Amino acid sequence: MHHSTVSRALRNDSRVNEKTRDQVLAYAREHDYRINMSAVQLRGESNNAIALIVPNINHTFFSDIISQLTDLAYQKGFVISVFQSNEKYKQEKQIVNTIIEHNFAGVIVSIAKDTPDGKHFSLLRNLGIPVVFFDRVCEDINAPKVLVNNREITYKAFEYLRSKGFKKIAHITGTASINVFRNRETGYQDAVAKFEPSYRKSVVVENDFSFEIGKSVFEQLWNSPDRPDAIISSSVNLTSGIIFQARVLGIKIPDDLGLITFGSMFASEIIQPQITSIEQPEQEIAEISFDLIEKLINKEIPADEKLEKEVKAEIIVRESC
Amino acid sequence: MHHSTVSRALRNDSRVNEKTRDQVLAYAREHDYRINMSAVQLRGESNNAIALIVPNINHTFFSDIISQLTDLAYQKGFVISVFQSNEKYKQEKQIVNTIIEHNFAGVIVSIAKDTPDGKHFSLLRNLGIPVVFFDRVCEDINAPKVLVNNREITYKAFEYLRSKGFKKIAHITGTASINVFRNRETGYQDAVAKFEPSYRKSVVVENDFSFEIGKSVFEQLWNSPDRPDAIISSSVNLTSGIIFQARVLGIKIPDDLGLITFGSMFASEIIQPQITSIEQPEQEIAEISFDLIEKLINKEIPADEKLEKEVKAEIIVRESC
DNA sequence: CTGTTAGCGCGTTCAA
DNA sequence: TTGAACGCGCTAACAG
């Protein structure tokens, strides 16, 4: 039997005799035959592996999205391959090289903190590998993007704190070079301008968000002349530090200090007081991102489409303000 | 210039003229030329992508190991590609198929809860792709394995609880079909036999460990005739539920109930009381696993070597017992 | 329905 | 030092 007949049989090509096909399949099963994807890809055939690049796997927001995407992809016959940039532009570029070399079908990405531009991603697209950005995006490149309403929700968080009687609301967030944190800051500034122009305090944490940084930033803030009576925190790691240090200093939440945090605290049920939080719709982000990359791979959308989808975070009211 | 000269130049083959090589490299850079890995692999060349299969990305133990492995791999020029089996044997087999089809250099794996045997992994090896198991392993296959001293540490946890005066120590753990939980149970049974033969209570949770399951299992246990005065819990998710429900029922930890949990609670600093925990050396597990897969890939170890490395978990004493 | 041929991009021969 | 020819495993196109 000729190998091209075998090839057809294995792909259930209708032109092959049933008996022949069954014979081939039986033999293949018997001998654990596997198609060689390298050869398939060499011929330019499609490929069902999608690369997912995240700054940090070890972070609830991203690991939730990874899980969701993996499940979605399986249902559609795709495989998600996860890469961690570790917040480093350099590693991100290395990953992009690997993706090019391994000829992935598409890429879903949330960029590292210090990624200055999207040249490496343009390159991907020039080589025919479509890219979808989510959450943290490159602004100098036209590509489908899934964004969170950070500006709006921060504004609303401020508004909510005010409605609870807090007057001196501070904002602890990340570097303005990332759209996510810049937009939160804009929302904060807008709210300050609207509601309480007399108090304004933003703390920008350039380091990685951590428990320790949260402790020290909070203590410094508390002991400064700008002592706030409420805080909007951009990260659960910082928030843990804030809660801990507040406890150390004998500060009562929410009596002495109101608190709203972006992100959900693991086991938030057993932390007292339970922290009011801004929850981002991870599942929706995953769904939209996957839908977009699938359409790009199938060329239903051009790869340089300027397409921005916004999803809405929401405030889950608990006990901290 | 002939393409084979170009090929040589790109690989820094010594037989090519320096001037020619520089010319080629300049041109390649200029045009963003990338080598086509499919073609390379088709020729049977090596490949620097290592697949990592975990039951759940969204779980501290595994996401820590993923992070560690990713960093280690980068330092050695490898790329880690993470796959989530979602605790499903079926998905695990699909992943193995993908790995075969994409011809990964090697696989590091911790198996799903319902994986009955290691046939799919034997297949990998028969096809020349080496496998290293860590934590949850297949017992019917000879391959390098990285194991945690679960039996011993559970025994010690029991011993420690006893030293604190607890008499009725229960064990909440997972299905005995997984080596990890079976060994913990053995450690528990050994300790019971040694120290306190009059009380013995194991609860095996077959479902996925979750906050809700933790709540209900604990409440049931507390209201049963076998009410314990201390618990060793196999999962932080279960533990959260236990803590929550204990609070609901007005049970004081550690006064009414002693508690030791496997795994670290996120933000454990702000949970009161702080929970005494059994911490597994994620970094060491990652290092040993990577070292083993690297040696297997380089054929410094035969792929079917029966090689078991044991790492030691340790008890971090906090306030819950 | 099945066989034949050609070529995907690369690296390895062998020859020049 | 370079070029030409071949084949890795597969599939599309064409021929039978």
Image: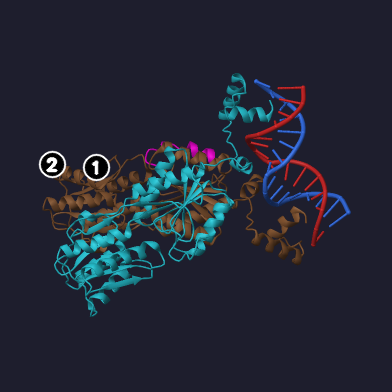
Chain colours: A brown, B cyan, C red, D blue
Comes first in the chain, label 1 or label 2: 1
Mark 1, other Cα within 10 Å: few <14 / some 14–19 / many ≥20? some
- Image-quadrant location for residue A173: top left
The reply, left or right, for residue A260 in relation to residue A8 is left
The image position of residue A305, as x and y in percent, is: 53, 46
Residue at left 49%, top 42%? B300
Specify whether disc 1 shares its chain with disc 2. yes
Mark 1 secondary-structure assignment: strand
Residue B12, can we see it?
yes
The prevailing secondary structure element of the residues shown in magenta is loop
A72 lies above or below A50: below
Name the spot of residue A233 as percent of width and height, x first: 26, 50
Q: Position of residue A218 (x, y in %)?
A: 19, 46
| Residue pointed to by mark 1 | A203
Q: Nearer the viewer, residue B170 or B264?
A: B170
In terms of depth relative to the viewer, which is nearer, A152 or B24? B24
Q: Considering the numbered disc 2 on the image, is that residue within a helix, a strand or a loop? A: loop
Q: In this rendering, would A121 be left or right of B10?
A: left
Specify whether A281 is left or right of B161: right
In the rendered view of the protein, which quadrant contains the C terminus of chain B? bottom left
| Image mark for residue A225 | 2
Instruction: Tell me if I can see residue B79 in this picture.
Output: no
Specify the farthest residue to the front: B194
Query: In the image, what residue occupies the spot 27% across and 46% down?
Result: A210
* Residue B37 sits inside the magenta stretch: no
Q: Which mark is residue A96?
A: none
Which range of residues does the magenta coloring cover?
A110-124
Question: Is residue A118 part of the magenta span, yes or no?
Answer: yes
Q: Is residue A171 above or below residue A94?
A: below
Q: Do the CB atoms of the residues marked 1 and 2 lie less than 8 Å apart?
A: no
Q: Would you place residue A200 above or below residue A29 in this image?
A: above
